[in-house]
Amino acid sequence: MRRNALFTAVALIALTASPVTAQSAPGAGNSERKISSRVLPNYPELAKKMHIRGIVRVEAVVRANGSVKSTRVLGGNPVLVDAAIDAVGKWKFETAQNETTEVLQVVFEGQ
C-alpha cells in the first residue's frame, strides 16, 4: 500500500515537471547576456524510450546583434546533444557592443 502511494507521488511529480529547461551556467564564461528568446529542444524519441535524462553543456558564440553565430558541445549525453545544439542555435540574446561567448546548460528531464 505504502509502495503504491510512493509510486503515485513520484508519477505526479514527473508529470508536472517541465521536461526540458535551459539556463546559463553560473560562473562560466566572461559574459552573462540575457536570453531574449529561447527555443526548447525537441526531446529525442530514443531518449524518451530509454528514459534518458541529463544536462548538455553548450558553448555559444553570440553576435553583437544577439543571434547565435556558432555552438560547441562541452559535454552531455550523445543522444541529447543534437537536440540541444539545434535549439540553442535558434536562441536570441540581448544586443551588446561585441560578440560574446556564453556557456549554457540545456537540461533534459524524464518524460
Image (cartoon, rainbow, N blue to C red):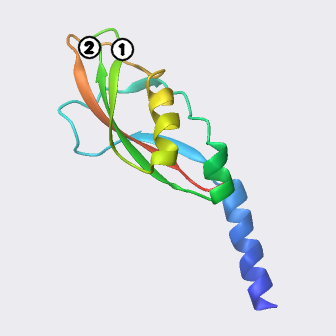
Do we see residue 98 in this rendering?
A: yes
Identity, as a three-letter code, of the amino acid under mark 1: Gly
**In percent of the image, x 40 and y 49: which residue is there?**
76
Q: Quadrant of residue 59?
A: top left
**In percent of the image, x 54 and y 27: which residue is there?**
39
Considering every residue shown, the one lying at the far right of the view is 1
Identity, as a three-letter code, of the amino acid under mark 2: Ala
- Nearer the observer, 42 or 35: 42
Q: Give the image location of residue 1, x and y in percent.
A: 82, 91
- Nearer the observer, 20 or 49: 49
State which mark lies toward you, 2 or 1: 1
In the displayed structure, 7 sits above or below 3; it is: above
The residue pinned by badge 2 equals: 96
**In percent of the image, x 54 and y 56: which residue is there?**
53
Left or right of residue 31: residue 74:
right
Estimate the spatial distance between the alpha carbons at disc 2 and disc 1, rounded to whole Å: 7 Å
In the displayed structure, 38 sits above or below 29; it is: above
| Mark found first going from the N terminus, 2 or 1 | 1
Left or right of residue 33: residue 36:
right
Considering every residue shown, the one lying at the far left of the view is 30
The residue pinned by badge 1 equals: 66
Assess disc 1: are there few (<14), some (14-19) or many (≥20) residues with their C-alpha within 10 Å of its C-alpha: many
Q: Give the image location of residue 14, x and y in percent.
A: 67, 61
- Nearer the observer, 82 or 22: 82
**In percent of the image, x 51 and y 47: which residue is there?**
79
Q: Give the image location of residue 74, x and y in percent.
A: 30, 42
In the displayed structure, 72 sits above or below 110; it is: above
Q: Are marks 2 and 1 in contact (CB under 8 Å)?
A: yes
